[in-house]
Image (cartoon, rainbow, N blue to C red):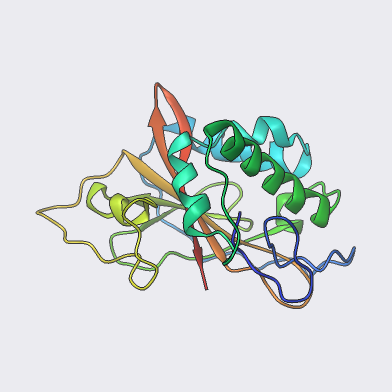
Amino acid sequence: MPGISNPKSKSQIGCRIPGLPSRLPPAQPLRTAARRPYDPGFQRAVSDFFRTWLIGEDFAKAATYFSPRCYECIELYSDDGKTPPFLPEDQARYIQNSLAAVGHEIGPITRLEEALESVPPEGDDMKLMAHADKVAYSLVALPDYLADSFLCTKHSKKSPYRAAASGSPSYGNYYAAIFELRTPGEHASAVTLLWQKQDSVWRIVAYELMD
């Protein structure tokens, strides 16, 4: 995603990928998570997105998983001194080029865990979910009250998870995929992709980069 910096090798999106063909040893699985009810279409959408992006290398199709609501994130995570794209078509192209830059740096893979490593969630109300690709990325059910803190229009870099709960947490409208890129040497910051169903389709409505 735009804004992940790498002092050694900076691509268009600034991903910490030195561009070496070697890989880290296989990631270790996270602890077993309790199964929780969720929309099965969400899990399929996330799996399809990562496979389209990193295994299929169809960057144009992968970019369609991003909602225009993500465009606010481009400005939030832009490199200092650079003017972010302003027009919606330029912002959409920027996301596609960003995905392509990461994909080209990683190179061909056949399994997601060659490129991604799951990151556990932080926060008691962020519920870890069981799924088939748990080594490559974490899936998390988010309560409605917490979703706003991930949206780039309301995002605080200093306290991204701070929000006030009201009564019992309500789940089912927002989910997140959390991961970091597996590269030799320095690792990328953890990336959180916030998902929401829009017009009956699960799409990425925000992303967050953690130092």
Where, by quadrant of the figure, is residue 172 drawn? top left
Please indicate whether residue 141 sits to the left or right of residue 60 in the image.
left
Please indicate whether residue 184 sits to the left or right of residue 5 in the image.
right
Q: Quadrant of the N terminus?
A: bottom right
Residue 149 spot, x, y in % from top left = 31, 57
Residue 9 spot, x, y in % from top left = 79, 69
Query: Toward the viewer: 29 or 157?
Result: 157
Query: Toward the viewer: 34 or 67?
Result: 67
Relative vertical location of residue 54 with respect to residue 63 in this rendering, above or below: below
**Residue placed at 70% from the left, 71% from the top?**
6
Any part of residue 177 in sight = no
Given the current orientation, which residue lies at the most extreme right position? Answer: 21
Given the current orientation, which residue lies at the most extreme left position? Answer: 167
**Residue placed at 44% from the left, 58% from the top?**
33
Relative vertical location of residue 24 with respect to residue 88 in this rendering, above or below: below
Given the current orientation, which residue lies at the most extreme top position? Answer: 199
**Residue placed at 71% from the left, 43% from the top?**
97
Residue 20 spot, x, y in % from top left = 88, 66
Where, by quadrant of the figure, is residue 44 drawn? top right
